Amino acid sequence: MKTAREHIPGSGTDRARWWPVGGRRRLVIGGLACLLVAAIVVVAVQLTSLFGRPLLSDDFSQPNGLITNEFAYYNQGNPAARTSPTWLATSGSLFALDNAGWTGVPNAGVPGPTSARVTNSSVFRVVTRRADFQNVAVSFGLFVQRFLPSQPGLDVSWQGVHVFLRYQGASLLYVVSVDRRDGRIVIKKKVPGGPSDGGTYYTLGTAGGTAISGRWEQVKASATNSGANVNLSVWLDGKLRLQTVDDGVGDVAPIAEGGRVGVRGDYTEFMFRAFTVTSA
């Protein structure tokens, strides 16, 4: 191997050290490689931090009062309407109460701009403005204050609180029942055409449970694509309670596209807090 001689100043006489030719070049290249690896690590950490952040989060840290209601949804552009940058209320009224979202006192009727006398939250439907949530998990704290008395002649076995996933519209969506009066945990798909507000529900999975009221409960529900199918899961207080797969139930294709997420309530007064959407 070729070598080159380097003189190193010393005390009294020069000392000599022999370097392989190209040795310094290898040292420089090695140093650059180390810097490149370090830069890649930094970028990877930054990307991990970025993608680990919630896609949406609402802690309702605002003064108590009306956030939005169905009046705003059906009267867009009305200067009296209370609009929200995060939420659309397609039915009922959404209030802020002590750092949580609240249905208000549920009743029936047509609310005005402020829902001062009528909330219509007996049938409560709120969804996000953002409409591209696909493979996500929705989580929040839930406090059921009370189930309203049963309506005479009306079958409300589904009375309670539910989560919307991949909401395309009122007749195309997934709905996860997380706290029903009858204690059932149910995952359904709704598709257009049928007697239920223009659609038909297909049950994808069901499990036994216990209706929880009077205390906070942690809810999590997710939808993820798996090939041509959609996997759906629900956790309550950190425990996986139900998993199911939509592989075309009812001869209707799974809802593979992203959509809105949200919360539904039927004849139930409740609060929900720390609403968070994350990648799943």
Image (tube, helix red, strand yellow):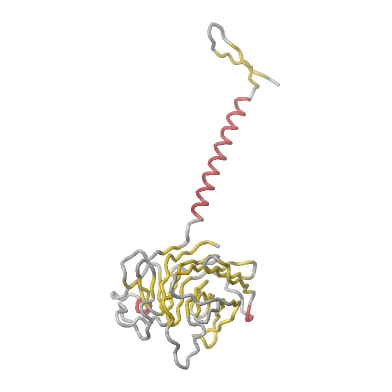
Q: Tell me where residue 234 appears, x and y as whole percent.
A: 55, 70
Point 56% across, 34% down: residue:
32
- Name the quarter where the C terminus is drawn: bottom right
Among the 4 quarters of the image, the one containing residue 146:
bottom left
Q: Report whether 22 appears left or right of 80.
A: right
Against 272, is 27 above or below? above
Q: Total number of numbered labels?
A: 0
State the residue lying farthest toward the front.
214
In this view of the protein, which residue sits in the foreground, 275 or 165?
Answer: 275
Q: Tell me where residue 103 appears, x and y as whole percent.
A: 39, 76
Q: Report whether 93 appears left or right of 163.
A: left
For residue 173, say whether it is visible.
Answer: no
Q: Report whether 108 appears left or right of 14.
A: left
Among the 4 quarters of the image, the one containing residue 24:
top right
- Name the quarter where the N terminus is drawn: top right
Among the 4 quarters of the image, the one containing residue 63:
bottom left
In this view of the protein, which residue sits in the foreground, 183 or 14?
Answer: 183
